[in-house]
Amino acid sequence: MAYKIVMPQLGLTMEEGSVSSWLKAPGDWVEKGDPLFIVETDKIEMEVESMGKGYLGTIQVENGLKVPVGTLLAMLTDERETAA
């Protein structure tokens, strides 16, 4: 089962944010509650925990790129992706 990782809304007025760094790499196994990435907004920088478990798939958004809340960042899947 796949789980979507999206840009979270960390406050009532947050409309966009950027991932400053990923704490896991594509292909890594992630458990629910594991620190996954760091979000940076104009007000804060915060570590975000995984809400699901699985293998981290391809990261869809470059570090530092501001994206709207809800933007797909990556997926957690049951199977590890392999390079083509």
Image (cartoon, rainbow, N blue to C red):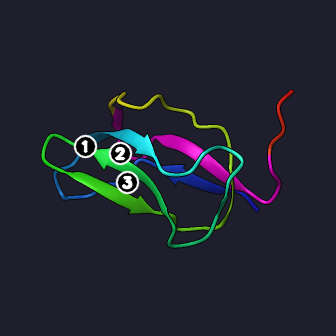
Q: Position of residue 16 (x, y in %)?
A: 28, 39
Give me the disc on residue 69.
2
Screen quadrant of the C terminus: top right
Can residue 74 be found in the magenta stretch? Answer: yes
Q: Earlier in the sequence, mark 1 or mark 2?
A: 1
Marks 3,2: beta carbons within 8 A: yes
Q: Which residue is mark 3?
A: 8
Q: Earlier in the sequence, mark 1 or mark 3?
A: 3
Magenta span: 67-80
- Give the label, 1 or 3, closer to the camera: 3
Can residue 55 be found in the magenta stretch? Answer: no
Q: Give the side of residue 28 with respect to residue 48, left or right.
A: right
Q: Is residue 46 above or below residue 60?
A: below
Q: Looking at the image, which residue is at 16% across and 51% down?
A: 13
Which sits in the foreground, 65 or 37? Answer: 37
Which sits in the foreground, 19 or 66? Answer: 19
Q: Secondary structure at mark 1?
A: loop
Q: Position of residue 26 (x, y in %)?
A: 66, 43
Marks 1,2: beta carbons within 8 A: yes
Give me the disc on residue 15.
1
